[in-house]
Image (spheres, rainbow, N blue to C red):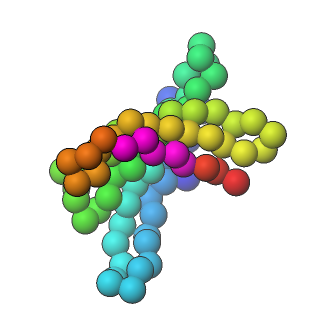
Amino acid sequence: MQKLLGGHANVDDNVIHIPDGNYRALTIRSFDAASGLWSIWWLDGRHPGRLDVPVVGSFKDGKGYFYADDTHNGQAIRVRFLWT
């Protein structure tokens, strides 16, 4: 993890191991001090031209709750990312 923007953002370079083979992905996070919300983007090395919509949320009682509206196979979905 590398801190950026004076500590209001960070990025990780990940190596993901799955049965189909390894791939790399990038996580980009930014903190909005005015709203108290984090935004988290995912850039998948298997699809390097597509940056996923950010999940947005905050931490409460030691857990992070993040949400986004997105699409999957052309259908609208609600994404939840739980950081424990």
Give the residue furthest to the top.
Answer: 34
Residue 75 in picture, x, y percent from top left: 26, 46
Predominant secondary structure in magenta? Answer: strand
Residue 37 in picture, x, y percent from top left: 58, 26
Residue 59, quarter of the rendered image = top right
Residue 81 in picture, x, y percent from top left: 54, 48
Vertical arrangement, residue 7 with respect to residue 76, above or below: above
Instruction: Say whether residue 82 is visible.
Output: yes
Question: Which residue is at a point 61% across and 49% down the rendered structure image?
Answer: 82
Observer-nearest of 2 and 83: 83
Instruction: Say whether residue 8 is visible.
Output: no
Quadrant that contains the C terminus: bottom right
Vertical arrangement, residue 67 with respect to residue 22, above or below: above
Vertical arrangement, residue 13 with respect to residue 8, above or below: below
Residue 23 in picture, x, y percent from top left: 34, 72
Give the residue furthest to the right.
Answer: 61
18 displayed left or right of 45 = right
Q: Range of the magenta residues? A: 77-81
Give the residue furthest to the front.
Answer: 75
Total of numbered circles in the picture?
Answer: 0
Observer-nearest of 23 and 65: 65
Q: Is residue 64 magenta?
A: no
Question: Which residue is at a point 30% across and 41% down the rendered structure image?
Answer: 76
22 displayed left or right of 58 = left
Question: Which residue is at a point 43% across and 41% down the rendered structure image?
Answer: 78
Vertical arrangement, residue 39 with respect to residue 13, above or below: above
44 displayed left or right of 82 = left
